[in-house]
Amino acid sequence: MNYFELFGLDTSFNLDTRNLSETYQKLQKAVHPDRFAHASSQEQLIAVQKSAMINDANQTLKKPLKRAEYLLEIRNTVMPNEQASFSDNSFLMRQMELREMLEEVKYADDVYTAIFEATQILDQEYELLFSSMQIQLGENTQESNLSACDNLRKLKFYEKLHIELDRLEEQLLDD
């Protein structure tokens, strides 16, 4: 049983997160260890395993990029590892430009403005890629799934840049 089936959801990228949360609570309540306090050790172990699976499923489905990756996985779309190089030379160039942009933030006359502008750029580009991936996942063809896979890898790069920018902001503004 896949995670979508476990939660009684359509196998789709777009889902009702409130429904996900409510179903998660119901499922966890059903397998809570307290309910199995007087059961055999095997039944207790099974309850713990089910609880762990429900937690994993919830964590995967509630986070959009993890959900996309899982969806591609159950569609048998092979996701290259993160160290595999991109064949998209324009994105490779963009990666370099964005890294340079983050480096320049350190030396900006107005750090607050530089951080704000960098955040805006990262957010806008992230949203464009995310929207594109969302459409591709909705199409669910072999070609669109491969494109969604490529965009997912790019989105993970943007997430890492956001983390780097957050660290940089903390470092610069704490000084």
Image (spheres, rainbow, N blue to C red):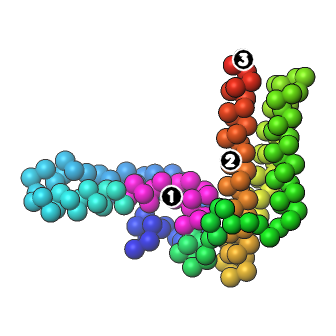
Q: Position of residue 175 (x, y in %)?
A: 72, 17
- Dominant secondary structure of the magenta stretch? helix
Residue depicted at 80% across the width and 56% down the height: 128
Which amino acid type is shown beneath numbered disc 1? Thr
Query: Does the segment drawn in magenta span residue 116?
Result: no
Pointer 2: residues within 10 angstroms few (<14), some, or many (20+)?
few
Question: Would you say 174 lies left or right of 44 here?
Answer: right
Which quadrant: the N terminus?
Answer: bottom left
Residue depicted at 68% across the width and 47% down the height: 160
Which of discs 1 and 3 lies nearer the camera? The answer is 3
Residue depicted at 30% across the width and 61% down the height: 50
Q: Position of residue 151 (x, y in %)?
A: 73, 64
Question: Would you say 107 lies left or right of 2 here?
Answer: right
Which of discs 1 and 2 lies nearer the camera? The answer is 2
Q: Give the SS element for disc 2.
A: helix
| Number of numbered callouts drawn | 3
C-beta proximity under 8 Å, tags 1 and 2 = no
Q: Which residue is mark 3?
A: 175
18 vs 81: above or below:
above
Q: Which residue is mark 2?
A: 160
Which amino acid type is shown beneath numbered disc 3? Asp
Q: Give the mark nearer the N terminus: 2 vs 3.
A: 2
Q: Position of residue 139 (x, y in %)?
A: 70, 76
Q: Please provide the residue range marked out in magenta.
A: 54-70
Which amino acid type is shown beneath numbered disc 2? Lys
